[in-house]
Amino acid sequence: MEMEGGEKSRSRLCSICKQRRPALKRPKTLQQVILLLLLLLVLLKLMEMVEMTIHLNMVFCCWFYKICRECFYVVFEEEIHRVIVDNNLFKPGERIAIGASGGKDSTVLAYVMSELNRRHNYGLDLFLLSVDEGITGYRDDSLETVKRNELQYGLPLKVVSYKDLYGWTMDEIVKMIGLKNNCTFCGVFRRQALDRGAALLKVDKLATGHNADDIAETVLLNILRGDIARLSRCTSIITGEDGPIPRCKPFKYTYEKEIVIYPLSYTPLILLSFSFLFGFDGIYSPNAYRGFAREFIKDLERIRPRAILDIIKSGEDFRIATSTKMPEQGTCQRCGYISSQKWCKACVLLEGLNRGLPKLGIGRTRGVNSERQKDDGVKNLQSKACGSLDF
């Protein structure tokens, strides 16, 4: 009885330090190995090699992997450090831009990167890079959060805007096109804006806050769209190595829930933004296609938390048939940005906006990438290519 009482008492303590009371259950660990452990214990019991009661209590404790707050911080940061080291994400002396939106993912990434850089002596020069899409009442608040992060973490900040790069704000684009398909403009323009901002900072890599949930959603979206080219690279932890600025994802295996939990009680990471806490999407994206994939992923996670990492693993294991024709990457004839067409997507979308044809280039239409329309577009819009930098 005394031994059983001791085991029961220990099961109420943190699974790692065995000293403090647990504060949370990690959602993603040990679920696949538990069944193997149980089968092994049953086999050993049949062979009368173990006392089943004691070991089942230990297995029950591991099933939930309950840990205290202090150990969670250590494990959270150490896992990200291992991802960085094991995947050789950075080299000493590199200049790294951290994509900073003011949301939970980028704010936690900026803090953790600055801490790990100091603690493990990565030897990196870190910068914050933010994009102002021109969304009144949404981006204004998050940019204030980024500016506070600049002071809190001591990292230089660079802000680039759609207005400066493209001559349009998202508010102006939505007035012209409406709420449907506006995410196409925002996504294409933001991706290129980050690359152009990174070029201004002369950085070697761009680190983004894409987490495991985001990557699982992207795998699912690419399958639903039949986008083989993106499916083959969306799970890569480093992308764009053949482009202007390589991108890396230190949070590739980090669950969104844990990114939310991490700062809630961690004194050094002060919460200053309402949008940080709840991770709101843009106000112009209520019906974004990704949102439906996100809901499906969350439903799967409630049933089986490990499903998120399994989807990522499935994406990593996809093999594209050698007979599959992949798009050939070149450069945009208009702005010099990477493109598999004569004009990059941003230039095509910008052409449509400037000509009063905002739906030009949306979907599978090629628009100005046909010879006749391309020639007309070059004559009409030489004054404003997408962005203002040469690649």
Image (spheres, rainbow, N blue to C red):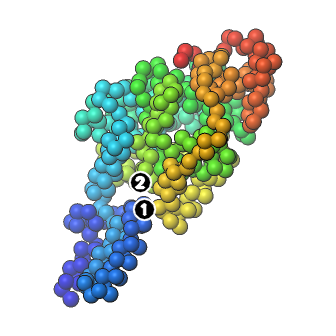
Indicate whether 64 appears above or below 195.
below
- Label 1 SS: loop
Residue 40 shows in this picture = yes
Q: Amino acid at mark 1?
A: Pro
Q: Nearer the viewer, mark 2 or mark 1?
A: 1
Q: Residue at x 73, y 13 (%)?
A: 378
Q: Which residue occupies the foreground of this view, 157 or 217?
A: 217
Residue plotted at (57% across, 16% down): 388
Judge whether 215 appears above or below 189 on screen: below
Using residue 343 as the reference point, say whether residue 203 is left or right of it: left
Looking at this view, name the residue that lies furthest to the left.
Answer: 2
Left or right? Give the position of 101 relative to 90. right
The percent coordinates of residue 140 (x first, y second) are 54, 33
Q: Residue at x 47, y 47 (%)?
A: 211
Relative placement, left or right, of 311 versus 20 is right
Q: Is residue 337 above or below residue 289?
A: above
In this rendered view, identify the residue nearer to me: 143 or 27. Answer: 27
Question: How many tags in the picture?
Answer: 2
Q: In whole angstroms, how far apart are the C-alphas of marks 2 and 1? A: 9 Å
| Residue drawn at (35%, 33%) of the image | 90
Residue named by callout 2 = 258
Residue that sits furthest to the right in the current view:
372
Classify residue 192 as left or right of residue 85. Answer: right
Q: Are marks 2 and 1 in contact (CB under 8 Å)?
A: yes
Q: Which residue is mark 1?
A: 27
Residue 366 position by quadrant: top right
Badge 1: how crowded within 10 Å, few (<14), some, or many (20+)?
some
Picture coordinates of residue 225, whole percent (x, y): 68, 46
Which comes before the other along the chain, label 2 or label 1? 1
Residue 173 to residue 312: above or below:
above
